[in-house]
Amino acid sequence: MPKRKNKKEKKTGGKRRALNLKDITRKILKVFRMNPGQEFNYKQLSSKLNIKDSAGRQEVLKKIEELKAQGRIEEQERGKYTLKADKLYIYGKVDMKANGSAYIISEEMESDVYIQRGQTQHALHNDLVKVYLFRRRKSGRQEGEIVEVIERARTEFVGQIEISPRFAFVNPDSSKMPVDIFVPLDKVSGAENGQKVLVKLTDWPEKAQSPFGEVIEVLGNPGEHDVEMHSILAEYGLPFKFPKHVEEEANKIDTEIHADEIAKRRDMRGVTTFTIDPVDAKDFDDALSVQKLDNGNWEIGVHIADVSHYVKEGSILEEEALARATSVYLVDRVVPMLPEILSNKVCSLRPNEEKLTFSAVFEIDDNAKIINDWFGRTVTLSDRRFSYEEAQDVIETKKGDLVDEILLLDRLAKILREDRSKKGAISFDKVEVKFKLDENHEPTGIYFKESKDSNHLIEEFMLLANKKVAEFIGMKKNGEPTGKTFVYRVHDDPNPEKLASLQLFVRQFGYQMQIQGRSAISNSLNKLLADVHGKAEANMVETLAVRSMSKAKYTTDNIGHYGLAFNYYTHFTSPIRRYPDVMVHRLLQHYLDGGKSVPIEEWESKCEHSSEREIIASKAERESIKYMQVKYMEMHRDQDFMGVISGVTEWGMYVEIIDNKCEGLVRLRDIKEDYYSFDPKNYCLVGDVSKHIYQLGDQVMVRVKNTDLEKKQLDYELIE
């Protein structure tokens, strides 16, 4: 008779299994290395890894087959495997440094492998490579040499071209690209000396120091705003326009809502419905509806644009949406996932227009308890479009359009938020840096966007819809997983080492943290974020707190969402700008129609792709903010600013301006009052003669010394 799961295991669903399977490839190979020459079958390996459930064992078997196909283990007899003889070799991805050295990140190793400059064998950042391991040094650091590039991560780079009478070179913008790219004169494609270009690698002869390439696009003159924005997009492989055939396909869409389509749906056009979005938004993914039921409870509808109705599986639009996977929000523009006719018109829930929607409808009592829920396709009509500022004004003044509905939702949202907080949800209300731009996209000012009650109102009902959709598909009524393939948004527990570093860091500012136990960590983080709010060091501490967390991602393997304190969570509410939400809509309808669980491989592959594209988009967004910060500070060279020391290194200290969050470097060589040395144990700079200390959190007065728009770097100088 099988053992019953204890209550804790049952409540957390798939969490325990996911923790056992983390870094599974590395752990399997470690078992082989610790037992040289010994044969193992998948059951024995599972036992060594303390994996006892059948799903976990199947995952081990799957990884064994992958390792066998890669030639890293050998099958000696049916079902029994040993490590291949070339056990001094590993495979991994390159983390390239600006000086030409690198680290190899490998599932097979518990720590990264260091590669000295000159031993990288033409490998570039993020390439998949084969590495020969040297004998471990007395220092304990594992070193090696790259012997083969298995797969290039990218072949296109943005940079500035330098043309001489006989040849040209492109100097890449990325600090992760340690070499220039040689371009023959017949491959410069009309580029002029000094222009920004997109260059593609064509060859890298064995004895050549630099790869060969050809210019495939001339971006324009450096320093011009559009050129720099397009350079950021090109650097990350992000398109800034749709191919002509995609636009043509979008323009063919039948935008009329026919009676036979309405007949298939729940008609909610007569229910009070409205949207709340940023004042400059053009794509309205979501709307809320409110009506009182005869029993005194409330019916709250969360209505989401039905993108999957228009973007059909296998279509040109589908292929483009999957390739992009997300909209990209640069500092001055949006690069949408879908063509404008869809994102801003057909699918956007604009006021006084009938729209096809996918909805989560809840019966909720006055205490925000969910009595019933319903999921399905609907047709809706938004009565009013609010900006966050307008909705906030209604909440604060208790006057205005739809005042009763907004105040009701605000009250219920606060109960939901409080309930999440009690269960361990972490409240990351990080301030967003925004720019005021003139008609030429020049920054005229910086302001900070903070979440208020109107933001939290929308957030709580979107979280509720996402959570309940995930539970509806993934969880049986008894709390057990259904086993159906689905797309989840998951967030693993924090990294203990990063938490320990955060604890040491904030101690310097007088803040205490508990880092033992899930509940203690959550409570401690929330208290830290509340205590630091509004302080000079707030942005720095909040940023480091976010970095101490694991990265959220999309996957079919549900491990729950630590930050939200949800055992089941997905993304259902933004299909205009996120491809995973389109996947969720498709799967939800499939299961509503009585469909069986779908094969996992295709959906997991799309999840991995979407997670990767999300990270790339986020990096591009940060680059655009850095660019605009440098541009803004360039216009304020003669102004003195109060800043807070946000980082200390052997080459200087980073200072973040309190008023605008623009971070720059004060180099050691530029501090004239004394000769300063870096104290790595105490994260501070110490004057050799004066013994004066500059440490994290100290406030200092600085002025702009140098700006580099191309590298997006700021140098400050201290003001006595």
Image: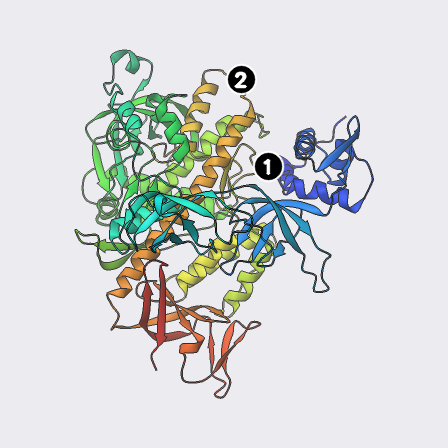
Residue placed under numbered mark 1 in the picture: 11
Residue placed under numbered mark 2 in the picture: 596
**Mark number, residue 186:** none
Q: CA distance from mark 2 to mark 1?
A: 25 Å
Dot placed on the residue nearer the N-terminal end, 2 or 1: 1
**Amino acid at the residue labelled 2:** Lys
**Amino acid at the residue labelled 1:** Lys
Residue 531 percent across, percent down from the top left: 43, 62
Residue 378 percent across, percent down from the top left: 32, 22
Query: Relative to the observer, which residue lies in front, 98 or 189?
Result: 189
Above or below, 439 against 365 in this view is below
Residue 428 percent across, percent down from the top left: 43, 52
Above or below, 223 against 328 in this view is below
Name which residue lies at 36% across and 24% down.
316
Q: Furthest-top residue in view?
A: 260
Nearer mark to the viewer, of 2 and 1 = 2
Please tell me how many numbered marks the rendered image carries.
Answer: 2
| Rendered image quadrant of residue 364 | top left
| Rendered image quadrant of residue 322 | top left
Callout 1 secondary element? helix
Quadrant including the C terminus: bottom left
Name which residue lies at 31% across and 37% down.
336
Above or below, 215 against 704 in this view is above
